[in-house]
Image (cartoon, grey):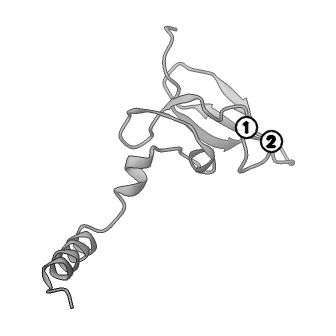
Amino acid sequence: MSKHVHRYRRINIGHGKPYWVMKCVKNGCSHYTAMASKLSCPILKDSVAECNRCEERFILDKRALRMAEPCCDDCVNKKTNPKVKEAEDFFTKLEASLPKL
């Protein structure tokens, strides 16, 4: 198989006793990396991976490695409700337009 950027997912491959790994979910790829614990994989920190949501490349950090399906910062920030964002923008503009005392 040709080289590619891995897209990881956390799975338990242990039988009886938990054994957590980060496995590449791309077709035909059998790559996986053992984790120190369910929420810690220092071997993959600062590695390049593919986001599970937008499929763009990003660098795995501590936050991403704690997720079952790691995603980039942009996708995490997209979770903000658009109406809440609109309200925040409205009040910011309103506050800026008020006269200073």
x, y (%) of residue 63?
Answer: 59, 50
What is the C-alpha distance between the residues marked 2 and 1? 7 Å
Question: Which of disc 1 and disc 2 is earlier in sequence?
Answer: 2
Residue 46's image quarter? top right
x, y (%) of residue 78?
Answer: 34, 56
The disc label shown at residue 36, or none: 2
**Residue located 21% across and 91% down the image:** 101
**Residue located 51% across and 32% down the image:** 7
The disc label shown at residue 42, or none: 1
Q: Residue furthest front?
A: 101
Q: Residues within 10 Å of mark 2 (few under 14, many from 20)?
A: few
Q: Amino acid at mark 1?
A: Pro
x, y (%) of residue 2?
Answer: 49, 8
Q: Amino acid at mark 2?
A: Ala
x, y (%) of residue 17?
Answer: 87, 48
Instruction: Tell me the SS state at disc 2.
Output: loop
